[in-house]
Image: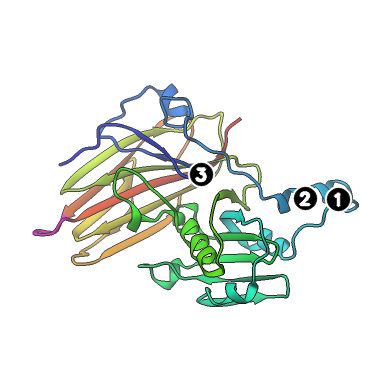
C-alpha cells in the first residue's frame, strides 16, 4: 500500500486543503488551524460577489440610494448553493453565451441561466451558469446539493487539484463567449457568513485501507459538512467516518463511479478527533484508485 506521508496544503482559487496521511501526525492545535502547519496558510476566504454586497447595502438603507444589483441576482440567492464567480470586465454577448449551454433554463434581455456540460461527466453533474451582459459569470450547484459536489476527481492526480467542476463550467462559458478567465472567487449563497471552504481528502492508489484523523475547533462556526467518494477499476471501495460507513461502492471494473452527500453536526462534533478511512480493493491487472474527501463550509473568526 502506498501511503501518503505528508499533509499537503494546496490553494487554487478557494481554500483547498488536501490531506493524505496514514496516521494523525500533528497536534490538535495544528489541526484546528485549518489542517496546516502554517496556521491557515493557503486558505482563501469565501467572498460575496459585489452584486450581493450592493443588495445587502440597499436593504440596510431601506432600499434607497446606491447602485442597483444586477438583474436576476435575487433568483441566484434563492436557488444557488456553493458557487464560483468572475467578472470578465467587459460586456458579454448573450447570444454567444446561449450557444454554450446544454439547456437554457431562463433568459431575459440582461442575463441567461442554463446548464453547462462538463467533459467526461454525466448530465447530473452539469454546472448551472448565470451570465449577465455586464460581465458577471456565476457557476453554481443548487442549494439542496452538498458543497462536496464541486470536487473534480477526474482531474485529480494525487498531488494537487488544479480546478473544480464550477471553475470548469465558468471556463467553458468564457471560452464560448471569447473572453479570458483571469480570476475566480467562491461564495456559498446558503451561508452568507461563511468565509472558508476546506476540502480534506485522501487517496488510495493500491489495494488496502488508509486513514486520517481530523478535529474541528469549536471556535469555528460550521455551516456545511459534506463528503465525496470516487473509485475506478475496483472490486469495491468504502468510505467510513469513525467506523461507520458513509458510502460504499461494489464492483466498478473498467469504469469509474462517484457519489457525495451531507453529514450532520452529530457526526462531526467539534473538539474531538474523528477518523476517516478509505478502503479500496484493486481490480487485478488494472491501475485502480479510490479517493475520499470531507468538505467543510465554515466561518473562522
**Magenta-highlighted residues:** 282-287
Which comes sooner in the sequence, label 2 or label 3? 3
As drawn, the label of residue 54 is 2
Q: Nearer the viewer, residue 17 or 267?
A: 17
Look at 59% across and 50% down and name the residue there.
Answer: 188
Q: Residue at x 78, y 53 (%)?
A: 55
Give the image location of residue 78, x and y in percent.
67, 61
**Residue 278 placement (x, y as % from top left):** 27, 46
Say what secondary structure mark 2 lies in.
helix
Q: Which mark is residue 14?
A: 3
- Front position in the image: 268 or 281: 281
Q: Give the residue number, with chain letter if any, for mark 1.
A: 66
Residue at the image position 41 percent from the left and 45 percent from the top:
294
- Secondary structure, mark 3, is loop
> Relative to residue 88, is residue 274 drawn left or right?
left
Q: Earlier in the sequence, mark 1 or mark 3?
A: 3
Q: CA distance from mark 1 to mark 3?
A: 29 Å
Q: Would you say residue 96 sits in the magenta stretch?
A: no
Find out whether the residues at labels 2 and 1 contact each other: C-beta distance under 8 Å.
yes
Amino acid at each position: 500500500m502506498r501511503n501518503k506521508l505528508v499533509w499537503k496544503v494546496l490553494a487554487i482559487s478557494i481554500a483547498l486543503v488536501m490531506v493524505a496521511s496514514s496516521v494523525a501526525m500533528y497536534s490538535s492545535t495544528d489541526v484546528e488551524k485549518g489542517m496546516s502547519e502554517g496556521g491557515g496558510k493557503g486558505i482563501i476566504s469565501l467572498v460575496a460577489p459585489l452584486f450581493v454586497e450592493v443588495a445587502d447595502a440597499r436593504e440596510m438603507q431601506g432600499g434607497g440610494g446606491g447602485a442597483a444589483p444586477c438583474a436576476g441576482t435575487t433568483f441566484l440567492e434563492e436557488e444557488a448553493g456553493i458557487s464560483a464567480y468572475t467578472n470578465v470586465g467587459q460586456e458579454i454577448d448573450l447570444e454567444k453565451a446561449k450557444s454554450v449551454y446544454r439547456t437554457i433554463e431562463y433568459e431575459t434581455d440582461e442575463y441567461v441561466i442554463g446548464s453547462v456540460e462538463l467533459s467526461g461527466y454525466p448530465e447530473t453533474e452539469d454546472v448551472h451558469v448565470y451570465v449577465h451582459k455586464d460581465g458577471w459569470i456565476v457557476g453554481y450547484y443548487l442549494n439542496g446539493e452538498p458543497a462536496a459536489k464541486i470536487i473534480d476527481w477526474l482531474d485529480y492526480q494525487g498531488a494537487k487539484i488544479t480546478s473544480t467542476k464550477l471553475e470548469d463550467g465558468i471556463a467553458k462559458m468564457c471560452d464560448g463567449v471569447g473572453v479570458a478567465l483571469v480570476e475566480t472567487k467562491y461564495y456559498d449563497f446558503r451561508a452568507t457568513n461563511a468565509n472558508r471552504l476546506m476540502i480534506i481528502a485522501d487517496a488510495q492508489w493500491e489495494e488496502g485501507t488508509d486513514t486520517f484523523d481530523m478535529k474541528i475547533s469549536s471556535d469555528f462556526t460550521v455551516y456545511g459538512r459534506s463528503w465525496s467518494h470516487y473509485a475506478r477499476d475496483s472490486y469495491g471501495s468504502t468510505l467510513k467516518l469513525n467506523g461507520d460507513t458513509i458510502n460504499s461502492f461494489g464492483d466498478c471494473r473498467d469504469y469509474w463511479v462517484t457519489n457525495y452527500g451531507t453529514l450532520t453536526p452529530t457526526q462531526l462534533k467539534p473538539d474531538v478527533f474523528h477518523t476517516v478511512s478509505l478502503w479500496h480493493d484493486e481490480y487485478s491487472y488494472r491501475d485502480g484508485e479510490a479517493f475520499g474527501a470531507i468538505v467543510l463550509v465554515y466561518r473562522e473568526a
